[in-house]
Image: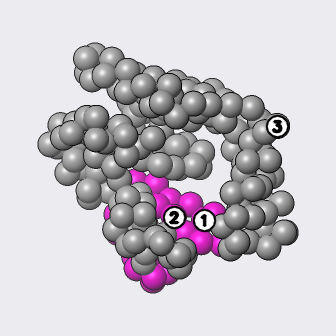
Amino acid sequence: MIARLLSSNPGALFLSVSATTRRPRPGEVDGRDYRFVSDERFRKLIDDGGLLEWAEVFGHLYGTPAEPVVRARAEGKDVVLEIDVQGARQVRAASPDAFLLFLAPPDRSRMREVLRRRLETRGTEHEEEIVRRLAEADREIAEAEGLQDETVVNDDLERATTQVAAILKERRGRD
C-alpha cells in the first residue's frame, strides 16, 4: 500500500525508515526496509534525543530517527511512519497535531489466522514466539481504539489505498 501511495503522490509524501537493532531478515535491505544499527548506536540516538519515538519489541529496539522527518516536514512533505501503538502514543504526546491513521484488519478472528500463516511462512519464529506475537497483535488492536484520528479497514488493497489517498488529500487541503 505504501509503495502505491508514494508513487501516486510524487514529492508530497516521505516514508520514514525506522531504525532497529535486530538483524536483517533474508531480502531486507538496509536503508530501505530498516536502518539496521547496533544496540550501542541505538542507545546513543535515545540519549541524544535523535528519535521521535522508540520501543523495545520482542527483544529488539525499534524507533523513528527524527532528523529525516524534521527535514521532510520542512520541505512541506507529509511524513508516513509505520509504527506500532507504543510509537503512536509517543508521537501523539510529542506532536498533538500529528494525524494518526490506523490500518485495521478486516476481521479480527481472521487476522490471527493470517498473521500466524505469515509468521510460519517467514520461518524466523518458534511456536512460543508466534503465540506471543499473536497475543501482542490482539492487545495492540484493542489499544488502538480511540488513539487514531481515522481508521481504514485493509480488506482490499486497491480500495484501502484509494481511501487512504483521499484522506491524505483532504488533510493537505485543510492544513
Residue at 40 percent of width and 71 percent of height: 29
**Tag 2–tag 3 contact (CB < 8 Å):** no
Q: In this view, does 138 lie to the left or right of 82?
A: right
Q: Place residue 35 in its image quadrant.
A: bottom left
Q: Which amino acid does label 2 sit on?
A: Tyr
**Chain-order first, disc 1 or disc 2:** 1
User: Callout 3: few (<14), some (14-19), or many (20+) C-alpha neighbours within 10 Å?
Assistant: few
The reply to whether the magenta stretch includes residue 43 is yes
Q: In this view, does 96 lie to the left or right of 144?
A: left
Question: What is the span of residues highlighted in magenta in the rendered image?
Answer: 38-63
Element type at mark 2: strand
- The image quadrant where one finds the N terminus is top left
Is any part of residue 94 visible from this angle? no
Numbered circle sitting on residue 56? 1
**Chain-order first, disc 2 or disc 3:** 2
Q: In this view, does 123 lie above or below 68?
A: below
Residue hosting label 2:
62
Give the spatial CA distance, label 1 vs label 3: 26 Å
